[in-house]
Amino acid sequence: MTRRLARPRDDRWIAGVCSGLARRFGVSPGIMRLIFVISCLLPGPQFIIYLVLWALLPNE
């Protein structure tokens, strides 16, 4: 059974996007947050993608 992609109400720091992605893919939320922070050091639209996911992902 696959987990649905949603922002959890409990384990949030800012918007819950990293926590929701971590639950969906079976990774620790801390690891997902670390991956996001490191990816922000690289060129690309990571922050914009985070904002879009914040707006589009439903709450649990």
Image: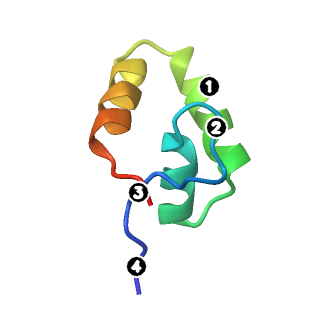
Give me the C-alpha separation between circle 3 and circle 2: 16 Å
Give me the C-alpha separation between circle 4 and circle 1: 26 Å
The residue type indicated by label 2 comes to Arg
Vertical side of 45 occupied by 52: above or below:
below
In contact (CB < 8 Å): disc 1 and disc 2: yes
Q: Residue at (62%, 25%) from the top-left corner?
A: 38
| Mark 1, residue position | 37
Q: Nearer the viewer, mark 3 or mark 4?
A: 3
Badge 2 marks a residue whose secondary structure is helix
Label 3 vs 2, first from the N-terminus: 3
Vertical side of 45 occupied by 59: above or below:
below
Quarter-wise, where is residue 26 in the image?
bottom right
Where is residue 45 drawn, in percent x and y? 34, 18
Residue 6 - label: 3
The residue type indicated by label 1 comes to Val
Quarter placement of the C terminus: bottom left
Q: Residue at (42%, 12%) from the top-left corner?
A: 43
Where is residue 23 drawn, in percent x and y? 55, 62
Residue 33 - label: 2
Q: Nearer the viewer, residue 54 or 29?
A: 54
| Mark 4, residue position | 2
